[in-house]
Amino acid sequence: MFKRQRTGSVVCASCGSLVGVNDDQCYTCGRRNPGLWGFAPVLRRLGTDLGFVPMIVYGSSVLYLLALLLTVRTGGNIMGGGPLGILSPNGQSQLLLGASGAMPVFGLGMWWTVLSAAWLHGSILHILFNMMWVRNLGPATAELYGGPRMVIIYTAASIGGFLLSSVFGLFRLPLLGAQLTVGASAPIFGLLGALMYYGRRSGSSMIHNEAKGYALALFVFGLIFPGIDNAAHAGGFLGGYVTSLWLDPLKPERVNHMLVALVCLVATALAILASILRVYPLMPYLL
């Protein structure tokens, strides 16, 4: 399944035209190295999102279960204080795995948590709702932008969302920012921002208006219900929209998009590892 193709023809990773596996450029869309060194067939088997949506779902689920286990092992209560808090990891376990916010970013100097926090969740309902949105919006974004560019948008939205939340949390503004924050909702808003920009750029009012309607409804929901990080939502939306301006969905994907996407994934994994190495020695003082 993962064998590299060395001869013959493949489908261009950008436009779907038939090209030689060793061609330097696609004669239809102009993409350089359309065969991706012979790995284009392997990547196409992963789908338009290159397997990123399942990676988010399974990766977030594993980290959520690990956070619950850490909470139980340290004597914490995972049942929370109400229906919305059922099966909730405690703050110490979240911090260990890379939660963001004013306290870790400015208090502990853990600036890299703006990458890792999007993969963590605060309760069973939190992760279920967020993964539902990821499964809904992720494939649509990948279809319009391509898998690598969706990874870049998702990562940039996470950075923008949690950075803004941390800054606002530092000043303790009401309804904005947080001392400790997690969740995929920041990059989810980034995907909505990307879809809105695509609708505007392509002239598709249906895509633009539908994404805009979802974004407004979710933002109003955040203002009504307590405990929701509205700054992360706003920053994520801006991060996704601005990144889409740079990526331009109407232009074909390039090889460097794949490389940048790979850097984003590696950086996120390193951010989680860095948090563990930074917080683990402090755990006796946090319990």
Image: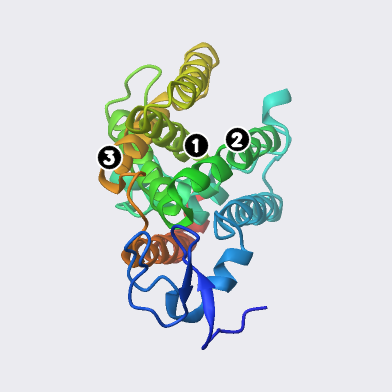
Q: Nearer the viewer, residue 272 or 180?
A: 272
Name the residue type under label 3. Answer: Leu
> Contact, CB < 8 Å: mark 2 with mark 1?
yes
Q: Is residue 206 above or below residue 104?
A: above
User: What is the secondary structure assignment of the residue under circle 1?
Assistant: helix
Residue 287 in view in this figure? no
Q: CA distance from mark 2 to mark 1?
A: 7 Å
**Tag of residue 133:** 2
Q: What colouring does the structure picture have? A: rainbow
Name the residue type under label 2. Answer: Trp
Look at mark 3 in the image and give the residue it sits on. Answer: 245
Name the residue type under label 1. Answer: Ile
Q: Nearer the viewer, residue 171 or 218?
A: 218
Residue at the spot 36% in from the left edge and 59% down from the top edge: 29
Horizontal and vertical percent position of residue 110: 34, 53
Look at mark 1 in the image and give the residue it sits on. Answer: 188
Q: Count of labels shown? A: 3
Category of crowding for the residue at label 2, using alpha-carbon neighbours closer than 10 angstroms: few (below 14), some (14–19), many (at least 20): some
Q: CA distance from mark 1 to mark 3?
A: 17 Å
